[in-house]
Image (cartoon, rainbow, N blue to C red):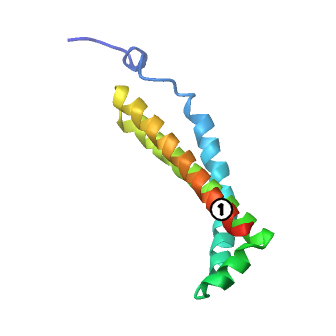
Amino acid sequence: MKFLTDRKRAIGMGSGREGTHHHWQMIISSIALCFAVPVFVITFGVIFGSNHEEVLSYLSRPLPALALGISLVVGILHFRQEIVEAVEDYVHGVAGKLTLFGTTAFTYVLIAVALFALAKIAL
């Protein structure tokens, strides 16, 4: 039977200080989403039920296009932070690293495609 102190059992299990940065990133992106999501919903609510030409003319204006672009970027980056946290907690080793790489690559490709589509509509 081993008699280990709490400190001895905790060695090698990770630092208690490494989550603060992630926590503040999530707080800031959550606050940004509190403002971006209503703007996103209002922007789509105005054009809901319109025909294709009206939607294109509405999104070609700078303010709705900018609102949609900011909402998409902040939302996808927040999604990426959540997925990274879940993968770090539950997937370990090479599979975890590959999953992190794939998730990060997917989210940045998704941002690029969304902004390209929005720019194509707006310009």
Q: Is residue 58 above or below residue 69?
A: below
- Image quadrant occupied by the N terminus: top left
Q: Viewer-proximal residue, 80 or 55?
A: 55
Q: Residue at x 56, y 29 (%)?
A: 18
Q: How far from the left and from the top, in percent, is residue 92?
A: 36, 29
Residue farthest along the left direction in this orientation? 1
Residue at the outermost top position: 2
The residue that appears at 52% across and 52% down in the rendered structure is 79
Pinpoint residue 40: horizontal percent, then vertical percent. 65, 70
Q: Which residue is mark 1?
A: 71
Residue 56 vertical placement versus 1 (above, below): below
Snapshot quadrant of residue 19: top right
Res. 116 visible in picture: yes
Point out the image quarter for the C terminus: bottom right
Name the residue rendered at 36%, 26% in the picture: 94
Query: Which residue in the rendered view is the most extreme toward the right?
Result: 62
In the displayed structure image, the side of residue 9 where residue 41 appears, left or right: right
Question: Exactly how many numbered labels are in the figure?
Answer: 1
* Residue type highlighted by circle 1: Ser
Q: Is residue 67 left or right of residue 84?
A: right
Quarter of image, res 56:
bottom right
Front-most of residues 46 and 3: 46
Q: Can I make out residue 92 in this image? A: no
